[in-house]
Every structure is written in structure tokens, then in C-alpha cells.
Image (cartoon, rainbow, N blue to C red):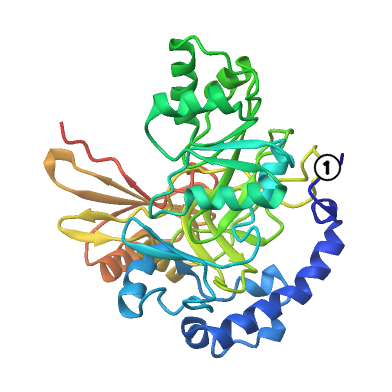
Amino acid sequence: MSQFFDALETRSADERKSALATRLPQQIAHAKTTTAYFAESLKHVDAAAITSTAALAALPVVRKSDLIELQKQQRPFGGLAAAGWGKLGRVFSSPGPIYEPEGRVADYWRTARALYAAGFRAGDLVHNSFSYHMTPGAWILEAGAHALGCTVFPAGVGQTEQQVAAMADLAPNGYVGTPSFLRILLEKVDELGIKLPSLTKALVSGEAFLPPVRDALLARGVAGYQAYATAELGGIAYETEARQGLVVDEGVIVEIVRPGTGDPVAEGEVGEVVVTTFNADYPLIRFGTGDLSAFLPGVSPCGRTNMRIKGWMGRADQTTKVKGMFVHPEQVAAVVKRHPAIVRARLVVTNPDSTDQMTLNCEVGTTDEGMATAIADSVRDITKLRADVKLVAVGSLPNDGKVIEDSRKYD
């Protein structure tokens, strides 16, 4: 049996680039002709010219944080969906509320590939402990399991003893859900004196999968792997047996951009995850997830050749309130664009003497007289707030994706 889900996973860079040059302009043209939002936002874009990730980077980003307002303006999906009632199989609601469509195609959320990499195979029984209520989490993994030929027990969340009893009776081969709830289930298994030798694999998501948790599962004979997915996009990236980052799914394009902008960052630099899908029903183009990550260099030792990301590294939306006024990452980016000498900037908010104070740390290669004053003037013009400006050496700021650091203390 192959260790790979299909031949797409081991394509050469040239093969992947060639396929993208054909598929990407088709998807952009589809989004423009079938959705109100992209018809307007991309009206001046020649879809046929967008044949690479470099060309894609010139298009605007629509961020997850925009969806609530967009959906208020145009129900139910803010003009971003190409399919409506009847063609869609389900609609879900996430906190906000934000509504997400599910089409009727098999493996709509593209999680079969991640499950396969985690060792799931046809004939397995999968214990699914994601929520089946309103949100799409459980359905995202169930669709992938069904596409592989697995049977699913829809456990959902809570009712720990009942779930353990079902596991003891049915002997599932694998688990999908959060890693923390799997630990709770296994602790209950121990408490009740139950043996569960059938459970040997898990695909976890929804929260950080820390090495101590992974190792604790391995000690019990359960090989756990993580998947990165969102309610809007489905599967984005997944862990393999190499355990070196997450391999990007073949059904999406991932970019890492500087928070508050659409500008790609250098390889290895932390930034916001921006995703373009090839989903026909919900054709999201440059969707900003609000999550932070970074690309890893090279290819995975497991043999899969697509790019890799480090995994979830925090949130990109670092908006904070200073002296009663909101300050956004986009405003910091606007200051940087006004001053080409700035390589990277980080706004630090403190409150000495219980008074809010902003300091903009700017990495610059060269300085000239008056640069700090000019930058401070730009900060005041853009944010309507005063800030000290500190010029620092290139490479001295932390590579953690933070554009705004709130270091105020309240005790």
C-alpha cells in the first residue's frame, strides 16, 4: 500500500508550477463571474495574467476579521459564495456569527489527505469527538474519513463516560478531535480499568499539539498527528511521519504575508497565513486567516514535495486600544510604507506611571538626521497618537510576527 495519498504529493516543482499556471487563472475567473464580492474587488484584474504566486500577491486580501461585517451587508455569505441553497448541502455557524457553506462534493473540506498521512485507511472505525452542533469541525473530518472508506462514530463533545463506553464496545482504530479531549478520554479509560488496544492513531486539530502531549500519546501506543484547518477553508496543511512542520495541502495556495498588509515575507519570517482555494462553491482568493506561521526551507524528508509551514504560531490580528483609540497593524504598515528605509517595525505599548505610551522600534540599514522625527510625525498623522521612535539594527527585532506588542502591566 502506498505511503502517499496520490501522485500530486510527490510532484516536481516544475510540475506544480505548470499546474498552477493553468488552474489559478481559471479559479480567479470563476470567482469573478460567480460571486458579487470578487466581481467588484477584482474587476480591474485580468484573470488570465494571474499564473503564479508572484502575480497572485498583487491582489487584495480579504480577511477573516472582515467576514462579520460583509455578511451583515449581504446575507448569508457576504457575496463570497458561488453556490446557494439547494446546491449547498449544509450551512454552519461559527462564533461571530460567521456562516460557512458546505458543498455536496465528496471530501469537500479536503481532509482525506491529512487523515491518510496520519495512517487512516479504508475499513477503519473513526471516533470523532469534534462538535456536530452548528460549527463544521466534526463534518470537516467526517467527510475526509468517508472519502477514505472509513466508518465514523459521531461522538461529538462531552459525555466522557458514554464516549469511553462506546470506545470499549466498538474498538475504534483512530480518533479525531482535540488533543486535550483525547487525553481526557484516555485518563477516563485508565480510571475505569478499560483496555483499548485497538486505538493506535489520531488526527488532532483545533488547538496546539505540544510535544509533551504527543509523546504521552505515543507512550500509550497512539501515534498522533496534527492538521491545520479552518471553518472557511477546510484543510490547509498537515503533519506527516517526518514530524518536521506541516505539509501544505494540494488543494490550496498558501502565502505568508506581513500582518496588516498583503506583502509576502521572506522565507522563515513569521507572518499571517493567507490562503487561496480551488473550491468552486466558495472560491476564496487570498483569504487572510488571522493566524501566524512561517515557511520552512526545503522539502519534507517524508517525500512529499509541497511547501511546509511551521504550524500555528499565534494570531496576526494584534489590534489594541491606546488612550481610548484603536491602533491596528495596518496603520503600522502604512507608516513603514511612507519610509522606505524601514525594513521592519514593531510598535510596543507600555504604561509607565499608568499612562499609555507607544514606542515604534524600526529596523533601518542607514539613518539620516531627522529620520526618527519624520517617522514619529507619520505615526501621529496615521494613528492620531504620539509615539517615540527608536531606530535599531536590521535583524534585531524578534522574528515572531508581532507588529504590535502590548506590554502594559495592570497589577
Question: Residue at position x 63%, y 23% from top?
Answer: 222
Quarter placement of the N terminus: top right
Give how far across and how far down residue 18 sits, in percent.
83, 70
Q: Quadrant of the C terminus?
A: top left
Instruction: Please tell me which residue is depicted at 83% across the width and 40% down the height of the picture.
Output: 3
Q: Out of 71 and 246, give the one closest to the viewer.
A: 71
Q: Is residue 230 left or right of residue 378?
A: right
User: Is residue 283 at all visible to an observer of this figure?
Assistant: yes
Give percent across and percent down for residue 110.
Answer: 64, 56
The vertical placement of 146 against 196, above or below, is below
Q: Secondary structure at mark 1?
A: loop
Q: Which residue is mark 1?
A: 303
Q: Quadrant of residue 8?
A: bottom right
Characterize the local packing of mark 1: few (<14), some (14-19) or many (20 or more) Cα atoms within 10 angstroms.
some
Residue 402 in the image, given as x and y percentages of width and height = 43, 48
74 versus 151 height, above or below: below
Q: Nearer the viewer, residue 390 or 207?
A: 207
Question: Which percent across, then down, holds residue 295?
Answer: 64, 49
